[in-house]
Image: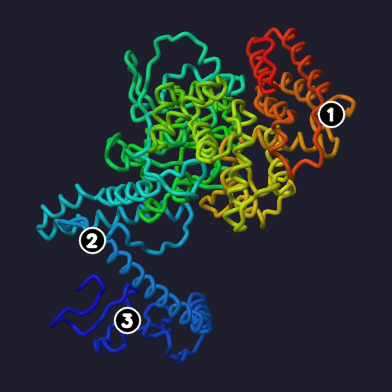
Amino acid sequence: MSLSGEREEGGPASKMSLSGEHDTKAKSPIKQERPASPVPSCVSMKSDRSMDHPIEFREGDFSSEQKNQQERSESEILSGQSSQSHQTDLASIFSLLEENIMTFVKNELKRFKRILSPELPEGFESQKQDKEVVDAEDEKQESSAREGALKITLHVLRKMNQKELADTLEKNSDELAMICQRELKSNLKKKFQCVFEGIAKQGNPTLLNKIYTELYITEGGTGEVNNEHELRQIETTTRKQARPETAIKCNDIFKPLTGQDKPIRTVLTKGIAGIGKTVSVQKFILDWAEGKANQDVQFVFSFPFRELNLMNGDEHTLIKLLNHFSMETKDSRISNYDKYKVLFIFDGLDECRLPLDFQKNKTCCDVTKSTSVDVLLTNLIKGNLLPSALLWITTRPAAANKIPSVCVDQVTEVRGFNDPQKDEYFRKRFSDEDLASKIISHIKTSRSLHIMCHIPVFCWIAATVLEHMLSTDKTEEMPKTLTEMYTHLVEFHTKQKNEKYLGKEETGPHWNKESIMSLGKLAFQQLVKGNLIFYEEDLKEAGIDVNEASVYSGLCTQLFKEECGLYQDKVYCFVHLSIQEFLAAVYVFLSFINDNENLMAEPQVTEVTVYKSAVDKALQSETGNLDLFLRFLLGLSLESNQKHLRGLLTKTRSSSQSHEETVKYIKEKIRENPSPERCINLFHCLNELNDHSLV
C-alpha cells in the first residue's frame, strides 16, 4: 500500500480510508456470521444501521431484563438517524484529515530530499511559502510534528536497509537552520552594505566598506550614568592627560580582555549622540554577513528600540518577536534557538520608551510563552530567556543605568574620531585635496568646532557648510562659532530644497516660517522631555498634521528624517541631537522676539529676559540637557546671526544694553557656580556672544 492508500499495480481493487471504511464500489460480498439476537443490533454493525427490523413479540410476560433490552432497542431505533448523520460527519472529517496529513508528510519528505541532495536547487533560499499566522501553542505543536515526521522517516529508511541515507539525514537535519542563516546573511548584507550620510534613505548611497573609518572604542568602565551634557563630556575627555587605555576593535567586543577569564554574554556600548554607535553596529553585522568576523555566531538579530516601542502594549512570545523582525526565521519555523549561538543587538537604549522594570517584571523562562515586550526584554537581559544567547546593547551615557550593572559583563565606549581620524574623514570625503586642506585648516582655528569634530555627524555638518561656502564666490566670513555653523546649515538646506522643488533660485527671504516654527516646537517640547525620536502622537502635540508630515520632511529633508518600521508606523527624528537643540533655540528665540513670549519662565515673567531665564534653567538641569541649547539661544541674540533669519523675524532686537546685561549675568553665574564643568559651558556661552574678556 502506498502512503496515500492508493491501489498498487496488481493489488486489490478496494481503497481503504483512514476512517476504516471501504468505498461502496469495493464492498466485500462476504457476509459476516453473527449469533441470533432477540432484537436487531442498531449499533454493533454498520450494515444493520439503515434497516428496519420488525420487533418480534413473544407470548407471555417479558422478564425485566428483556423489557429493558426492548426499551433500549426502541430508543436506539429512534436515534438511528442521528447516529447515521454523526457517522457521515466523522467520515468527512477523517477524509479531510487524511488529505492534510498526506500533504504535511509529502512536504516534509520533499524537505528531507532537499537536505539529502548534493546541492540545493538554485534560488531555493528565495522560495517562500505562504504561512498562516499561528499562535505560540500551534508553533510548538508544529515543531513537534516535524520532529515526529523526521523520526518516522529515519525509522522507515532503516527498515528499508537505507542506514547510510538515514544517518546522513539525521546528521544534516539542521540544514534548515543553515539555509535560514544563509538567507539571513544575504538580506543583512543588502540592508547594511550602504550608508546614507546625514539622512536615512535619501541622497546617494555610499558603500560602508569604502568610507568606514575605524572608530576609537575603549573599555568603558562600570557603565554608571554621567549627568554631564554630552558635549561637555567630550571637552572633559579632550583636556584629560593621556593615560593608558584599552582600545577594542568593534568585531572583538565579545572577546575577553587580557586577564579576564569569565566569558562575556552581555556588552553595553555607550557613546554620545552621533558618535558612531549605530554605524558600529552596522559594520559589525556587515562583517558577519560577509563572513569576515564572528563566524562562530550562527544567528544575528538586530532590534532598534525605536521599533520595539511600537510593539508596546501587545503580547508576544520571544519566537514571535523574532519573526516580526526576521522573515527568514518566520519562514523556517525554527524554535529551538537554545541549540545555536545567537546574538541579539538592541540599538538605542536611550530611545526606549518601555518601562524595563527589572524589579517588578515577572519571570519568564519559556520562549513560547506570550507576554509583554517589556517582560521579554528584561528576562532576556537577566538571562532567564535563552541564557546561552549573546546580547549587545548600545546607548547614550545618560541612559546607561537603565540596565542593572549585574546584568552587564563588559562596558565599552565609542569615543568617535581622534585628531588624525578627523583629518582622515575630510580627506576621504573630498577628492579635491586643496579643498580638504582648507576645511581642515579652518576647523583647527576654532577650538569649539575642532572639539565638535570628534562627532562623525558634526564632521558631515561642517563639511556640508564649509564646502558650500568655499565653492561659491561669496566673500562672507567663514563661521567660527557653533551658532554660525548651524545657522548656515539650516539656511543652506532650506534654500537647496526650495531651488529643487520650487524650481527657482532664492535671492531674498527663503524661510517657510510655519514649518520652521512647527519643527522648532517639536524640537523644544521633546528636548525638555529628553526624547530624540518621535512618533505620531508627538507630532500631533506639536501641531503637526501627521498626514502632511512628509511635507515637513521634504522641506527640511537634511534636518528631519522619517523612517518606516516593520509595522509601517513612521518614526521621526532629527539627524543629530545638536540640530534638535538648535531648532529648539530658534523656536524659543522667535517666540520671544516676535510674540514677546518667554517660554523659559514658569510662570512667565516678561520683565526677565528670555536669556537670563534660559541661563537659570540650564544651570538647574542635572543632566545638562539644555547646555548646547543655551549656547545657540545666546548666539541667536547677535544681530550678525539674525540677518540669516530674514523671513522668520518680524523685527530684530539686539540692543547693546541687553547684550551687556546678559554677559554680565553670565559672569556673575560663573563666580557663583563652584562646578568647573558648569563654568566651562558658561565660558562657551560668552564665546557665542563674542565676548572674550575672561579668556
Q: Residue at x 81, y 42 (%)?
A: 650
Disc 2: which residue: 122
Foreground residue, 347 or 635? 635
Mark 3 and mark 1 in contact? Answer it, CB < 8 Å.
no
* Amino acid type, callout 3: Pro
Q: Looking at the image, is 281 positioned above or below residue 22?
A: above
Could you say which disc has been placed on residue 592 in the image? none
* Amino acid type, callout 2: Glu
Q: Quadrant of the C terminus?
A: top right
Disc 3: which residue: 35
Local packing at callout 3 (Cα closer than 10 Å; few below 14, some 14-19, many 20+) is few
Could you say which disc has been placed on residue 602 in the image? 1
User: Percent from the top left, x then y, of residue 480?
Assistant: 59, 26
Mark 2 and mark 1 in contact? Answer it, CB < 8 Å.
no
Q: Residue at x 29, y 49 (%)?
A: 182
| Left or right, 601 with reference to 101 | right
Q: Residue at x 47, y 41 (%)?
A: 197
Q: Quadrant of the N terminus?
A: bottom left
Q: Looking at the image, is 479 positioned above or below residue 181?
A: above
Q: Earlier in the sequence, mark 3 or mark 2?
A: 3
Quarter-of-image position of residue 383: top left
Q: Is residue 314 visible?
A: no
* Amino acid type, callout 1: Glu
